[in-house]
């Protein structure tokens, strides 16, 4: 049963399941100014915990209210058990807060682990396609340096997804090039596509049938990816043969 009350801000404790990792001062100041001019359009959501309240959703709004020096705020009281509260906090923040792609991916992973949900089930909760959830989770396979760049908005989600197509041993070098040259999304995808094409032209000394077979396998792999399957595709060439390596991950 939900109800709206006016409560003291000092009585609100942070939520340990908050998906946001970084809060930028300028963003909070802008939100504070908006609240000052138009009021709190959407109340924060809390649940009662003994003599205090635990925040479920609205971390940025709460910080903005504190910045304004407010002592009280309207809040939606939603008393739920720990698991439901944790899932609601994550889902509401995913839907309403301006999270980075990495924060989204970590929150989705936590929802799946804590609630034993599948990608499809989480996608339904969030109003996403299953392939969208799979793509976001794939970002967590990137190196920490690249994930940090995504979290700091140095690299966009689409650029990061393009980087996943690059072989792991070459990914760091390609990432450095993209950042150094300040490539946008289109230029990043064009650059990585050119690298893929360059790599495929290295296959020499094989019959046209072998090349056709490799291209057919790549097309089939691309179709699987479009259907939401999470995997990797690599070509390994030696003096005697060429290996096409495809790996699909088990769906959660």
Image (spheres, rainbow, N blue to C red):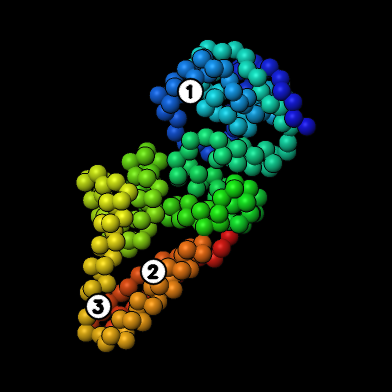
Relative to 249, is 41 on the left or the right? right
The image quarter in which residue 78 lies: top right
Residue highlighted by disc 3: 203
Residue found at x 23% / y 67%: 198
Q: Secondary structure at mark 1?
A: helix
Q: Nearer the viewer, residue 97 or 22?
A: 97
Q: Which mark is residue 233?
A: 2
Q: Secondary structure at mark 3?
A: loop
Residue highlighted by disc 1: 31
Q: Give the x, y percent position of residue 81.
A: 73, 38
Residue found at x 34% / y 55%: 163
Q: Is residue 15 visible?
A: yes
Q: Nearer the viewer, residue 190 or 200?
A: 190
Query: Number of marks in the image?
Result: 3
Q: Quadrant of the N terminus?
A: top right
Relative to 222, is 196 on the left or the right? left
| Looking at the image, residue 157 lies above or below residue 238 | above
Q: Quadrant of the C terminus?
A: bottom right
Residue found at x 24% / y 44%: 182
| Looking at the image, residue 58 lies above or below residue 194 | above
Q: Give the x, y percent position of residue 36.
A: 52, 14
Q: Give the x, y percent position of residue 196.
A: 28, 65
Q: Give the x, y percent position of residue 191.
A: 26, 56
| Looking at the image, residue 126 lies above or below residue 78 | below
Q: Nearer the viewer, residue 36 or 170?
A: 36
């Amino acid at each position: 049963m939900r109800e709206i009350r006016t409560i003291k801000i000092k009585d609100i404790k942070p939520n340990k399941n908050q998906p946001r990792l970084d809060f930028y001062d300028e963003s909070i100041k802008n939100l504070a100014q908006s609240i000052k001019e138009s009021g709190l359009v959407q109340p924060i959501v809390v649940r009662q915990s003994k003599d205090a309240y635990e925040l479920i959703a609205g971390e940025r709004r709460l910080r903005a209210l504190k910045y304004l020096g407010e002592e009280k705020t309207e809040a939606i009281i939603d008393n739920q058990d720990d698991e439901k509260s944790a899932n609601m906090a994550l889902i509401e923040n995913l839907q309403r807060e301006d999270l980075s792609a990495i924060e989204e991916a970590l929150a989705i992973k936590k929802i799946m682990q804590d609630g034993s949900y599948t990608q499809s089930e989480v996608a339904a909760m969030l109003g996403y396609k299953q392939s969208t959830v799979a793509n976001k989770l794939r970002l967590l396979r990137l190196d920490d340096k690249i994930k940090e760049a995504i979290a700091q908005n140095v690299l966009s989600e689409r650029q990061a997804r393009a980087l996943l197509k690059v072989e792991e041993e070459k990914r760091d070098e390609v990432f450095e090039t993209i950042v150094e040259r300040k490539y946008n999304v289109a230029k990043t995808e064009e650059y990585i596509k050119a690298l893929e094409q360059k790599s495929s032209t290295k296959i020499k000394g094989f019959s046209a049938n072998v090349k056709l077979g490799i291209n057919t396998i790549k097309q089939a792999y691309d179709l699987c990816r479009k259907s939401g399957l999470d995997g990797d595709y690599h070509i390994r060439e030696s003096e005697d043969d060429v290996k096409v390596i495809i790996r699909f991950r088990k769906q959660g």
